Image (cartoon, rainbow, N blue to C red):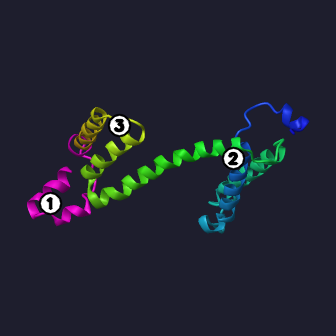
Amino acid sequence: MPTERERRFVGLRRGQLIFALAFVALTLLMLSMITSETRWVDKTRLFAQPRFWPAVALGGMALMGGLHLYRLPWRRITRYDVWETQKWLMVVEYALWFMAYVLLVPILGYLPVTLIFAPALSWRVGYRSPRMIGFSLVFAVSVVILFKSLLAVKIPGGAIYDYLPGALRSFFIVNF
């Protein structure tokens, strides 16, 4: 049964406790690593120290996150909190798609990976008709042409291109 303080709370409740716990935990983790990530320079003023402002920021984040956690009117994680957290974690999937893309480009090459990922992401977001998959393939080829040819962006060739014969290898590295 909710307390009077819980009933009077104005605002969204879903996920606040999990967010506050995760925020404080990550801030304390970063604060614990500050000595290995930054340094203290001798004969330098306090405000010019490389460690000073990150320490102030992380200390403030830990303090304010702790106060937020302390002032929350509830201390139980409900199923609504878990549902909200699952929605937040769905975003991580697309970061993993991007990381896989970035890791595969130097191995397979820009064109092949783009031709694989554009239709795969179209399929993933629900565009599953042959027409939409075709549009995604046209989009992938257009992006490669735009970046490699028109904008002359220097993207390293894939390691798989090393197995091609000499002239064909050079052509693929320069254009695809």
Name the N-terminal-most of marks 1 and 2.
2
Label 3 sits on a secondary structure element that is loop
**Would you name the residue on which mark 1 appears?**
169
x 34%, y 47%: residue: 117
In contact (CB < 8 Å): disc 3 and disc 1? no
Dividing the picture into quadrants, the one containing residue 104 is bottom left
Upstream in sequence: badge 3 or badge 2? 2
Q: Name the residue under label 3.
A: 128
Q: Does the magenta stretch include residue 165?
A: yes
Residue under numbered circle 2: 19
Q: Are marks 3 and 2 in contact (CB under 8 Å)?
A: no
Relative side of 126 to 149, left or right:
right
Q: Which amino acid does label 3 sit on?
A: Arg
| Nearer the observer, 133 or 114 | 133
Mark 2, secondary structure of its residue:
helix
Dot 3, crowdedness within 10 Å: few (<14), some or many (≥20)? Answer: some
Q: Does the magenta stretch include residue 153?
A: yes
Secondary structure, magenta segment, majority class: helix
Q: The N terminus is located in which quarter?
A: top right
Determine which quarter of the picture holds residue 119: top left
